[in-house]
Amino acid sequence: MGLNNRRAILRDALGIAVATGAYALSFGAISVTAGLSIAQTCALSLLMFTGASQFAFVGVIGAGGSPWAGAATAALLGTRNALYGLRLAAILSARGPRRFLASQLVIDETTAMAIARDEPALSRYAFWVTGAAIFSLWNLGTLIGALATHALPDPKVLGFDAAPPAAFLALLAPRLRAREPLAMALAAALLALVALPFVPAGVPLLIVAVIVVLYGVRPR
Amino acid sequence: MTWAALLVAAAVCYGIKLAGLSLPQRFLEDPRIQRTVPLLPVALLAALIATQTFSSGQHLVLDVRAAALGVAAIAVLLRAPFLVVVAAGAATAALLRLAL
């Protein structure tokens, strides 16, 4: 039973890792098209290791925004990982150096895999194998995507500059099933476009973030 | 400057993850934080989609990228896998640029 469960977890973890590896190919390509070097692209996947934040960082720079506006957007998108850590803390009970290692692996996929188990030992196993598998293939996929795109004479001919909005839409779609997030998404898009002609690139996103925070913490 | 911003952003993203595993549980259980944090990715991703599709620098524009986003939206509605959605968007922009 235990063996079978672990085998099933390992199989699922590898499946998710292959899918995120393919996603990393597109990240590598989009990042190099946005003007980042191969080393910068790979550093993002190694050090930041949280997909939406990485796409946002290169997306803002690709649109002509300041790298600091990109950094702020990436950090804001990463805040959800703190809530994942909160849920995982009791399950993992990682102390000392293990906690520092575990932290880097706290992302959407590892959280989903860990909290789906009934036994704490299986949750921990799911977290670590999913994290290790995704980290490996995410970085490998990034490197391959970056190298392949670097070899192209003009990536824009292939429409790679139109890829980030498509990628963001695919990331966003599963979160839009309820009415409040859908209304929030439409309002945010409209607000960003209204602000765009009046402020430097990247800043419309920060205005949106401030308004969302004010909306979220308002007294009710 | 890109390197500095990159390293700072990576450090902040790591600090956020570490904080989740380390902070007292009651801090992150505050209902205002529980409510606000899930809304941030939704709003920021939507704003990113809008600004990257309909702008060039500080100007609002309507070009082949809008059509690319439309095709990507159809792919999402048809529950296409992630890479298919991205490839459909990119291919639409590339083909329209060739045709126009």
Image (cartoon, grey):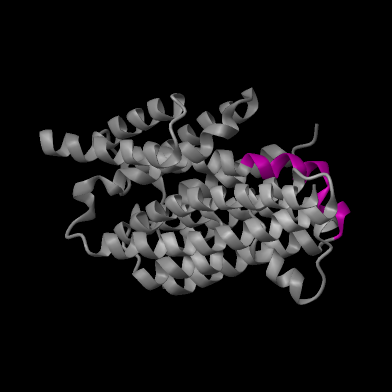
Residue A75 appears at what percent x and percent y? 58, 58
Is B32 on the left-hand or right-hand side of A73? Answer: right
| Above or below, comparing residue B59 to residue A25 in the picture | above
**Residue A34 visible from this viewpoint:** yes
Between B83 and A80, the one nearer to me in the picture: B83
Q: Residue furthest bottom?
A: A97
Q: Nearer the viewer, residue B76 or A164?
A: B76
Q: Please tell me which residue is depicted at 23% across the width and 54% down the height of the picture.
A: A155
In the rendered view of the protein, which quadrant contains the C terminus of chain A? top right
Q: Is residue A176 above or below residue A43?
A: above
User: Residue A215: which quarter of the image?
Assistant: top right
Residue A140, position as x, y percentages in the image: 44, 64
For this view, does A7 lie left or right of residue A48?
right
Q: Is residue A110 magenta?
A: no
Which residue is rendered at x = 39% and y = 55% of the image?
Answer: A25
Report whether A34 appears left or right of A218: left
Q: Is residue A195 visible?
A: no
Q: Which residues are magenta?
A: B24-39
Say if the magenta span includes residue B35. Answer: yes
Q: Residue at x 42, y 61 (%)?
A: A142
Image point (34%, 52%), residue name: A63
**x then y, percent, for residue A47:** 54, 69
Corner quadrant of residue A31: bottom left
Farthest left residue in view = B99
Q: How many marks?
A: 0
Q: Main secondary structure of the magenta part?
A: helix
**Picture coordinates of residue A54, whole percent (x, y):** 49, 57
Q: In front: B12, or A14?
A: A14
